[in-house]
């Protein structure tokens, strides 16, 4: 199963266990605290929804720790938060979609009685990445759950899951933090300049993880700015092809940088586990295990690339959203309501040059491109087609 170890949050928890790593979700924490302590408030399956970066997974693991630990056992909570407790199973998909095989493995685990804690908890991150056939695998487990098993699903919204799944879970919606709140958090966590932190929070559209990266990575900020300006300069099919190629190349480099170190560490760990010395030949008898690892890593690389391109498309949506705001006279004094204030002059010029329906056509095309990428459309072709719409104002 493509289940990866949960990041060890326990080593950096700033406040009381297990809720210290949860930020800006006081109402949700209060609801889950009550559920963990009062059986009458408890249900067997939860769906935690909120925009990317709102802390869905962090909250899910905190809740899992509170559910599993007996009498506030701090050691058990830390095990859960580190992803090592035997009564928690977590699925963080490394592929573009969650496979039926992985879903079946989770269902099988859900029928095991808890071995040490009060509950067995199954956490499924990215539950929105299930296709219909995979979702159906979960239905029986959600309809007839074992008495001491709890399912925690995470997704951006209820609409991302089938109605049959939604009807069998209790939904907890997270609040979306303000830009100022995210900026303050980034400054506290990283020591970033408050001006840079505010810009990063705004550009990331309040996605905490992305805001932190932008605030602390000069190169990431520069790449984002260059990409937006490159799209603004698209005037022809040739420009569209060139810019699409640059975007995919940059996303590919980012994906490689994010996964290369982890890939090598996983390979070295597997070889040590198999008793193979560094640099030694791999015996034929264990090559299948190494091949399986490499296949998982290739799927993760594909997912990382597509996530990177989706992030670019999200940034483009924010830019053309700004143009629409200006066209409707909603940019605010000095562009105060714009996400991309640094491009104020360029966006005002575009807003004046384009009819509103052309901007709306481009926004529709970007949204369609994001959906197409989820269906494994070739990224370069999808971006080229979208950028042709930017150049012409018409859908190819």
Image (tube, helix red, strand yellow):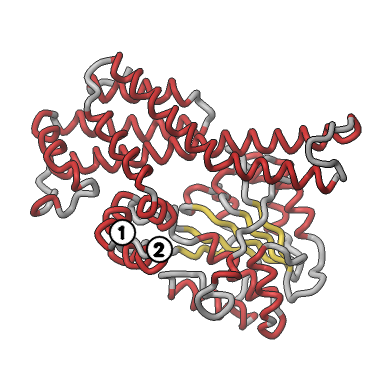
Of residues 216 and 170, the one drawn nearer to the viewer in this rendering: 216
Residue lying at the far right of the rendered structure: 285
Q: Horizontal placement of 285 versus 32: left or right?
A: right
Task: Answer above or below: position of 121 versus 328.
Answer: below
Residue 381: image quadrant is top left
Task: Answer above or below: position of 148 versus 285.
Answer: below
What percent of the width, then of the height, locates residue 119? Answer: 73, 72
Task: Answer above or below: position of 383 versus 170.
Answer: above
Q: Residue at x 47, y 49 (%)?
A: 159
The answer to whether one can see residue 97 in this image is: no
What percent of the width, then of the height, locates residue 52? Answer: 44, 53
Q: Residue at x 38, y 69 (%)?
A: 188
Residue under label 2, please give it. Answer: 190
Q: Residue at x 66, y 65 (%)?
A: 82
Of discs 2 and 1, which sits in the foreground? 2
Residue 32: image quadrant is bottom right
Residue under label 1, please give it. Answer: 197
Of residues 84 and 165, the one drawn nearer to the viewer in this rendering: 84
User: Dot 2: what SS?
Assistant: helix
Q: Are dots 2 and 1 in contact, CB under 8 Å? A: yes
- Identify the mark at residue 183; answer none if there is no mark: none
Q: Residue at x 10, y 34 (%)?
A: 349
What percent of the width, then of the height, locates residue 140? Answer: 72, 53
Mark with earlier residue (2, 1): 2
């Amino acid at each position: 199963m493509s289940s990866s170890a949960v990041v060890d949050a326990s080593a950096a928890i700033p406040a009381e266990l297990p809720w210290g790593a949860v930020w800006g979700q006081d109402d949700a924490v209060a609801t889950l605290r009550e559920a963990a302590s009062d059986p009458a408030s408890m249900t067997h399956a939860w769906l935690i929804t909120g925009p990317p970066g709102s802390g869905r997974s962090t909250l899910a693991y905190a809740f899992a720790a509170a559910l599993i630990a007996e009498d506030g056992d701090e050691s058990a909570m830390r095990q859960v938060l580190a992803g090592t407790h035997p009564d928690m199973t977590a699925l963080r998909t490394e592929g573009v979609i969650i496979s039926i095989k992985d879903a079946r493995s989770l269902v099988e685990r859900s029928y095991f009685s808890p071995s040490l804690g009060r509950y067995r908890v199954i956490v499924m991150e990215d539950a929105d990445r299930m296709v219909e056939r995979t979702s159906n695998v979960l239905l029986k487990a959600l309809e007839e759950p074992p008495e001491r098993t709890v399912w925690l699903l995470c997704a951006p919204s209820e609409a991302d899951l089938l109605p049959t799944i939604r009807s069998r879970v209790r939904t907890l919606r997270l609040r979306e933090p303000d830009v100022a709140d995210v900026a303050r958090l980034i400054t506290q966590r990283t020591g970033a300049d408050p001006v840079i932190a505010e810009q990063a929070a705004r550009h990331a559209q309040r996605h905490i993880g992305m805001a932190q990266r932008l605030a602390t990575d000069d190169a990431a900020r520069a790449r984002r700015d260059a990409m937006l300006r490159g799209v603004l300069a698209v005037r022809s099919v040739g420009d569209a092809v060139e810019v699409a190629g640059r975007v995919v190349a940059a996303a590919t480099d980012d994906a490689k940088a994010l996964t290369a170190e982890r890939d090598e560490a996983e390979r070295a760990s597997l070889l040590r586990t198999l008793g193979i010395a560094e640099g030694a030949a791999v015996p034929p008898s264990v090559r299948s295990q190494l091949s399986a690892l490499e296949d998982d890593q290739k799927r993760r690389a594909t997912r990382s690339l597509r996530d990177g391109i989706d992030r670019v498309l999200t940034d483009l949506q924010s830019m053309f959203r700004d143009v629409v705001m200006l066209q409707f006279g909603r940019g605010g004094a000095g562009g105060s309501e714009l996400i991309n204030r640094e491009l104020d002059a360029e966006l005002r010029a575009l807003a004046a040059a384009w009819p509103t329906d052309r901007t709306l056509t481009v926004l529709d095309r970007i949204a369609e491109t994001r959906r197409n990428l989820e269906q494994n459309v070739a990224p370069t072709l999808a971006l080229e087609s979208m950028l042709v719409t930017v150049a012409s104002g018409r859908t190819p």
